[in-house]
Every structure is written in C-alpha cells, then in structure tokens.
Amino acid sequence: MKIICVGRNYADHAKELKNEVPAEPVIFMKPKGAVLLPWKPLYYPEFTDDLQYECEVVVKICKNGKYIQEKFADKYYDQVTLGIDFTARDLQRTQQAKGLPWEIAKAFDGSAAVGEFVPITVETTVSNLAFQLKKNGETVQDGHTRNMLFTVDQIIAYVSKFFTINIGDLIFTGTPAGVGPVNPGDMLEGILQGNKVLEVEVR
Ligand code: MG
C-alpha cells in the first residue's frame, strides 16, 4: 500500500505557512512504514526540533484504478477517519529553501498516524465532515471538508492520472489552519463528526 498526501488543500493553512494557494493539487507520498496504527504512541524523532501536527481527513481506497473520472471517483473509497501528517517543520523548511524533496521531513516512520476507520454513509459523506484536533484537551484545529480547495473526488481523478491507486491505499486530504508543535508528553485527539477516532500520545 501507499499513502498519498495532499499539501495546501485549505486556503487558511496555505496562508498560515505563507504558501500560495495552488492551482493544482500538491501531491506527495509516504511509504507504508510511515503508518502509525490507531492508539499507538509516537516517539519524538531525534532528527528534529520542530515536530508539528497536521490533522487531516483520511480516506481508504477500496478499488484498484487508473485514470479515474471525477464523477466515478466516489466508488473508489468507502471508509474515512482522521490522521495526523506529522511534519519535521525545521527539516521541511531547509529542504524547501534548497528546492529539495520533502521526504525526510514528512515520510519518516510514524509520520502518518491513522485513526479508526468508519464506513462512509450519508452521515459521513466526505464533502460534509466537521473535524477537530485537540492537544492536551484544548481544540487547536477546527476544520470542515467543505473548505477543501480540491475535493476528494478531484484529488483521486488527479492522482490516478499519474499513479494506479490500489485497494488499501490511504489518502491524506490536507490540513486546515492551526498547525503547531508537539512535545513529549502531549496528547493529541481527533474528533470526527463528534466522535473520537484518533488518539496519539507523543513520548
Ligand atoms: Mg499535511
């Protein structure tokens, strides 16, 4: 499986990092080894001094496909949860400044925390999901998927032009504003439509 991630998919987050709002989806990937399974802790990596959370809606692919049309894309995912795209912001900034790839800042072991998946139903239509991230009990991110610049269906149509998508692949759909640092001892909780689906303790 692979993890496909979208950068800068909410205008308010692009602005907070002083990035331009993109005309096409910004895509990057994480390897399978980046997955942090539900309810597992993350050990603070020694190579960064600025580990940050980015809470994102994550969908799971249920059908193999390539060149998927937007109008059929909703047949290709059937479960949703929240995830955290953990980012070594200091490494990302130095890589970006040099025009180098992001992987060491974004694709390291444990950098893709995933919550418990829930089936997509009328109540969990991906275009109409409210979600929050709490850090030590305080809400630090409060997002809604209606504010995505590119919908999940548009992302799948775009990505599948380049990459075959396979059953079990995950798509991290981008983070809203409010990203920030974590430190050992912090507790992160993700709330999707009022239900806690994600918990990560940083150690
Ligand atoms: Mg992200």
Image (cartoon, rainbow, N blue to C red):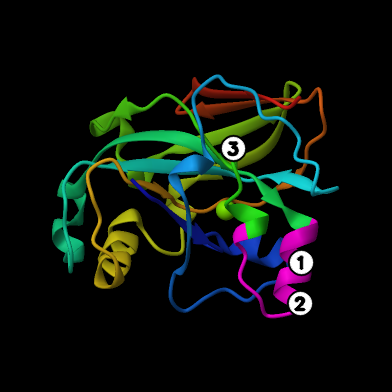
**Percent x, y of residue 114:** 48, 33
Between 106 and 140, the one nearer to me in the picture: 106
SS label for mark 1? helix
Q: Identify the residue under disc 1.
A: 93
State yes or no: residue 164 in magenta. Answer: no
Q: Identify the residue under disc 2.
A: 97
Residue 113 sits above or below residue 48 on the image = above
**Percent x, y of residue 63:** 16, 46
Q: Are marks 3 and 1 in contact (CB under 8 Å)?
A: no
Disc 1 packing (10 Å; few <14; some 14–19; many ≥20): some
Amino acid type of the residue tagged 1 in the rendering: Arg
State yes or no: residue 96 in magenta. Answer: yes
Q: Nearer the viewer, mark 3 or mark 2?
A: 3
Q: Which residue does the image show at 59% across and 60% down from the upper left?
A: 103
Residue 135 sits above or below residue 34 on the image = above
Queried on whether the Cβ of the residue with tag 2 lies below 8 angstroms from ligand 1, the answer reads no
**Percent x, y of residue 22:** 52, 75
Instruction: State the extent of the magenta-drawn residues as a range.
Output: 90-103
Identity of the residue furthest to the right in this view: 49
Amino acid type of the residue tagged 2 in the rendering: Ala
Q: Are marks 2 and 1 in contact (CB under 8 Å)?
A: yes
Disc 3 packing (10 Å; few <14; some 14–19; many ≥20): many
